[in-house]
Amino acid sequence: MKKRLWLVSLIAIFIFSSVLVGCVEKKSAGTGKNDKTLIYGRGEDAKLLDPSLVTDGESTKVTDQIFDNLVEYADGSTDVVPSLAESWEASEDAKVWTFKLRKDVKFHDGTPFNAEAVVFNFERWADKNHPQHKGGDFPYYAYMFGGYKGDPGHKIKSVTAVDEFTVKFELTSPQAPFLQNLAMSAFGIASPTAVKKDPIAFTRNPVGSGPFKLKEWKKNDTITLVKNENFWRKGEPKLDKVIFKVIPDNSARFTALKSGDVDIIDGLNPTDVAPAEKDSKLQVFKQVGMNVGYLAFNTEKKPFDNPKVRQAFNHAVNKEALIKNFYSGLAKPAINPMPEFMLGYNKNVKDYEFDLDKAKQLLAEAGYADGLEVEFFAMTAPRPYMPDGKKIAEYIQADLAKIGVKAKIVTHDWQIYLDKTGKGEHQMALFGWNGDNGDPDNFLYVLLDKDNTRMPDAANIALYKNDELHDLLIKAQELSDEKQRAELYMKAQEIIKRDAPWVPIAHATVPYAAKKEVIGFKTHPTTELSLEKVDFAQ
Amino acid sequence: MQTDNVQPPVTNLPEAGAVSHSTQQDNPARDFARAFFRHRSAVIGSVLVLIFIILAILAPVITPYDYTEPSADALAAPSAEHWFGTDDLGRDIFTRIVYGSRISLWVGFISIAGSIVVGSLLGLLAGYYGKWQDTLISRLFDIMLAFPSILLAIAIVAMLGPGLNNALIAIAIINIPTFGRLMRSRVLSVKVEDFVLAARAIGMKNSRILWHHILPNCWTPIMVQGTLSFATAVIEVAALGFLGLGAQPPDPEWGTMLSDARDYLQLAPWTMVFPGVAIMITVLGFNLLGDGLRDIFDPRMKQ
Amino acid sequence: MLAYTARRLLMLIPVLLGMSLIVFAVVHAIPGDPAKTIAGDKATPEQLQEIRKNLGLDQPVYIQYFKYLQALLQGDLGTSLVNKTKISEEIGPFLAATAELSFVAIAIALFFGINLGILSTWRQNSWLDYGSMFIALIGVSIPIFWLGLMEQWLFAQELGWFPSNGRLDPRMEYEPITYFYIIDALLFGDMAMLGDVLKHILLPAIALGTIPMAIIARMTRSSMLEVMRSDYVRTARAKGISEFLVIYKHTLKNAMIPILTVVGLQLGLLLGGAVLTETIFSWPGVGRYIYDAINSRDYPVIQSGILVLAFIFVMINLIVDLLYAWIDPRIQYGKE
């Protein structure tokens, strides 16, 4: 027996060492110590690195660094400024758009950027029969431009190369936010050579023209980008390397920042903002969010088919307290479905004040003097517009109890939550929205129009249907005059307030924290991330 | 397994399961009690378990606070007023832990009872009938044991939807094979005992033999394992709660409290410390008790 | 012996088949729609239907199962719905991360477990014995996710001795060879990297190793006590051999077999049970890989991931059993 034990150990050692010998072939370890490397801590890994295929912000945070769009958003607003297109003009009827392109741009693989490249990208996204329409379903394209080639609602009739550096778009009907749409992360222009080589592999080895190029992707851990030495905007990027690091838990990520493991983080817990601000080694960036967190009533189910009940609940939600406790004050109480800085925001709409007596009275008028029981859906995953849905639900639950409403909180993980609310299985549910192109249509039409109540995938989870509102919103889509549009949206907000399909709760501020020596970092209302101007002090 | 026990043991009494001792005393209950109280860890364990049962039952008497009602006094440090401090909604943590003991004890009890019933039944069938039943059931246990149990539990809860009851079902399911295998091996050794062979020889029906002769002689190890599994179940429900798959708000489940507290680790460490200690002490109690019982019932292990 | 091995291997087939069926059934009973994960919050119903069709999710479930099984038999673990990558291509680094963590955890557990066990046998029924066994009891009673958080709070946050997350400082960039960072660091002969890797692995490994440590300690104690009562130890003692030698040479070696069995079993359990530890320490391991897949309804990843883990578990058990039988020929190769 003793012998055998020995034999086993010997064999084990032999196998192990032969494995070692087989592998020894030293590759570069370590790295230039003087490189300027920024480590960006965030909560989740990217899914794919082809921006036209994804819908999650974690993927586009990375692709924003790799790809450029024809146009981009200006600092701090959703106004559009030149990027790969130097200039553009629209025809009288706003149906034909002509873009003049930059002539000095090359993709990371050396392919020159030109009008053909733009046409290639748009055709790949639009045409289901395109040989490289692969790797996914190009959801944003269909979403922003009314479907794919051949669909009845498809907005883009054609994209043509007029000459080497001029591109012409013909639309079927005017689209008010057309330029804003082009600036969205999803429409980053990819190198045709790389896509043609293998569109599936492209999702892991993206090639764009942006300030950084992909070096390495360790799944669920890090994505390393290195400087694009030939970036067309001279003098940028300032950094040599950017590493995106996944740290799922918000507080663990903050700890990593404090201990210097990472240089900048997003998804800061609201409660950690004050400590971060006090910390002399850190700085905090706060971005007024283009978002809304709300409580939606299922207007097709009892008791919320009765507007009185919805109004009563509106009076029973203490927004100030919620913001103080769960957003650490980092939010604005929401009165309308969209934030204040947006086109057509109606300042004259008066909110339902927090008043439990009034709420009780309204309930009694609605025939629920003896109270009622409801199911209350709350999400467990922290969302940018609602850092802790469960806690917010608990707080509201306690206030509702005071007006005789027994609310039973039901939580689901995010996938099931989307599924169930999309099918209208809830009575009332916490929900929210991150705007992505800065247009009011992106809030009011998407979230509250009757067009978007189709189950099982309703985006309007209140299932709120109002024809008067619908007419206003459709009219606003086709106008291009801002003033006229603003008027229509103002009217829409009044109707929504009156009918109270939601309790709008808050427009959350999105906090980032970084080491003091990080300079040049700017946040953006769309939460698009731009790192080409970021640098380290000294 | 010793097979020197010739007398058919009395049914229904807990001590009857002790097939492996050949007791000469007249009163096995007293014998058990004596052994139990001489066993230090059994005594400590049962005291800890008792404390938590008492806390669970008398919760409203013990603490003046409400476990759901938020108050303005959020994240207060431990004080004379709030022994364990308050959480982010200003609720008294001591109160929530006391009420939380109800949840842990309830989940532990029901889920383990469930897996004992199902597991024993399967084990009994496998062990007694042998043949294809045995093969089928044993392979099923093999399969279940090979799954990473926490992932299996997570998948089951994902299937059923999060919530305390579904967490309880998941825990019951993942513990079934433990009891099934135990029961099976026990049945295999009991069924060749003389009293069973004798019962068979006089033509007694299978069901009667199973219920009256075999089952009663298999309870002891099941009870011991049940006590130990209770401890694991308390941890498992806390783990599921920690992942947001267990108890729903405002229920003060310990694991859920821990996951809520995680965000306040810097500001208010007490929100994190006390629920963890509560889990640990409860689990410790059941482990001590289970160890003690095993030593008493299985003297070969006793040192 | 050969026949025994062959029979054990044959027995694996129905087990693995059964596993695949159960996993498939459970996974497909999970409500939620993978199409939504892919298309995101803003998808239209038409898009979702299209995606479902492309993924074959509109076919009857049993056909989906047979297709899955067929692919599996050809060694194809499937393709992730979320990122379109072949699972067999991407699961390797996750497995390596978890395996490395588990090995280190087991090493720590072995060292402390055996020595605690020895300590308590050495002075049986003394306070040393009780103390060691009390530590072991705490070890099996502590919720490890809580222990992990406490470690993180104390050692990473308050004291700043160890990093709180990850496997390696991302600034230390390198090309993985084996994806076992410790081995890679040794291969490079890069001591700075080795130090950093060890610093990163220590806290999660301690958390993960606590339960096996406690179990090993108790196992060591009971099996040592048994061996110590045996004749040849008594003889050795009678011959006046020093107590140290008696314990470490004569007794421990003979007590090792049951301990090694425990180690094998625990290793199998750790490989699949590290979800919580991996979540807390942002460890890019296979537990979290599957957990994330459950959350995004990435059916192929959940199925194949769990199956791979279960397969490894079964294989480890088989190897332990075979080794056991080989080292100690007294064990029969008979039925169970």
Image (spheres, rainbow, N blue to C red):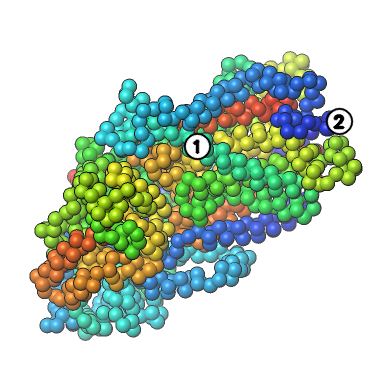
Q: Earlier in the sequence, mark 1 or mark 2?
A: 2
Q: Residue B93 placed where, x, y %?
A: 37, 32
**Residue occupying the point 38% across, 53% down:** A375
Nearest the eye: B299 or A126? B299
| Residue type of the residue flagged with mark 1 | Ser
Q: Residue furthest right?
A: B201
In the image, is A116 to the left or to the right of B223?
A: left
**Residue occupying the point 38% across, 42% down:** B250
Q: Residue A479 placed where, x, y %?
A: 15, 76
In the image, is B199 to the left or to the right of C196?
A: right
Asked if B51 appears above or below B168 in the picture, the reply is above
Asked if B244 appears above or below B261 in the picture, the reply is below
Q: Residue A461 placed where, x, y %?
A: 32, 62
- Disc on res. B104: 1
Residue A119, quarter of the rendered image: bottom left
In the image, is B15 to the left or to the right of A450?
A: right
Asked if A427 appears above or below B238 in the picture, the reply is below
Evaluate whether residue C158 shows in this view: no
Quarter in which the C terminus of chain A is drawn: top left
